[in-house]
Image: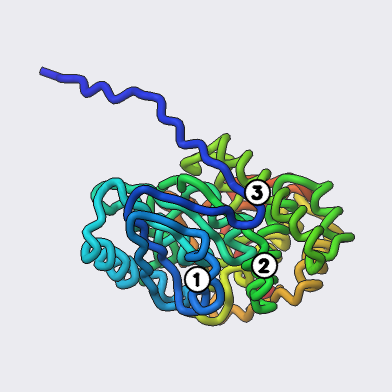
Amino acid sequence: MTIDINLKREIDLSYQVTIDTLPELSFDTKVAVVTNPTVSALHLEYLLAKLTAKEVHVITVADGEEYKNWESIELILEGMFEARFNRNSLLIAFGGGVIGDMTGFTASIYQRGIDFVQIPTTLLSQVDASVGGKTGFNNKYGKNLVGAFHQPKAVYADAHFLSTLPKREFAAGVAEVVKMAVCFDADFFAWLESADLNDEQQLSEAVAKSVQTKAWVVAQDEKERGLRAALNYGHTFGHVIEKETKYTGFLHGEAVAIGMVMANDTAVALGWMSEEEATRVKALLERYDLPTSYKIKDVDTFYETFYLDKKSADSAITFIIPKSLGGVEITDAIDESLIKKVLGQYA
């Protein structure tokens, strides 16, 4: 005997990204703002002045990629249980990509799923991490290997928060902007080469263009079964670098910048990208003082770590490699010897 469980249905998960001054926010439920000490000290007062709810709680977790772990998730959950949150309660992710990923994941599992809102405070999170619903945390095996797709109800990207970013944090966000352009829009890349993202107006244009690009990709492939994997350009190499340095040597965007250069070297070796194009990408990254080199201690160990990447399956390692500027290839057919030859340039 077989019994069908018919769960076919249409669910609208659409939401808006507001790139403007943070509006007044009002919620008829309990709300918890999840943040870290750095963001709290700089901007919590600004947010709370615009936020009304039945109850407002603030849950603070330690600042840094090394704290993107299960212990921090448990701390957030504990705060919610202590405040007696229910399925109608709401979380607000108030910070960078680390806070956004952990808050979104916690929202996805609390009482089997509640709503959350993203208020990203870094350039990296405004242009990339806050949009698309990818959530999760790191463990000893690698980055973001535990997570869920859980879309926010809204995203509010306010340039006010970017004014206090340290230079390195700002540059880390620029890396993600460059990533979007290299993968999907050669004209946007050319515009970035002549633009100055330290200019507020040009920065706003870059944020808007990046979010539009990310939104288009997510709309085509929400669960990353195809096109969306292209947004991991630079990440396959970068995640290994982050793991080797125990998430303390480089900011995420810095590791991605190095990873993009490594991916470009691979593209040149494959004949998919000219040396001139690879040099242009590297020059743009270096203009914002992003690192573009890394000393690999052991090529074989570095290569083996690729197998822990979420995009890889069984014995096949998936790489995201640019095809000229504005194009990208998702492939698991690159010969191991070619990749190791490229890695050898960094040994």
CA distance for labels 1 and 3: 24 Å
Q: Quarter-wise, where is residue 297 in the image? A: bottom right
- Image coordinates for residue 16, horizontal then vertical, percent: 56, 42
Q: Nearer the viewer, mark 1 or mark 3?
A: 1
Residue carrying label 1: 44
Q: Residues within 10 Å of mark 3 (few under 14, many from 20)?
A: many
Q: Could you say whether the residue bearing mark 1 is in a helix, strand or loop? A: helix
CA distance for labels 2 and 3: 19 Å
Residue at 52%, 60% (x, y): give it: 50
Going by the numbered disc 1, the residue's amino acid type is Leu
Residue at 43%, 55% (x, y): give it: 135
Left/right of residue 67 with respect to residue 330 in the rendered view? left
Q: Are marks 2 and 3 in contact (CB under 8 Å)?
A: no
Left/right of residue 196 with respect to residue 18 in the rendered view? right
Going by the numbered disc 2, the residue's amino acid type is Ala
Residue at 36%, 69% (x, y): give it: 59
Precedes in sequence: disc 1 or disc 3? 1
Q: Could you say whether the residue bearing mark 3 is in a helix, strand or loop? A: helix
Query: Is residue 6 depicted above or below 166 in this figure?
Result: above
Q: Quarter-wise, where is residue 121 in the image? A: bottom right
Residue 312 in view, yes or no: no
Going by the numbered disc 3, the residue's amino acid type is Val
- Image coordinates for residue 162, horizontal then vertical, percent: 66, 68
Q: Nearer the viewer, mark 2 or mark 1?
A: 1
Query: Is residue 198 depicted above or below 132 in this figure?
Result: below
Of the pair 263 and 20, the residue shown nearer to us = 20
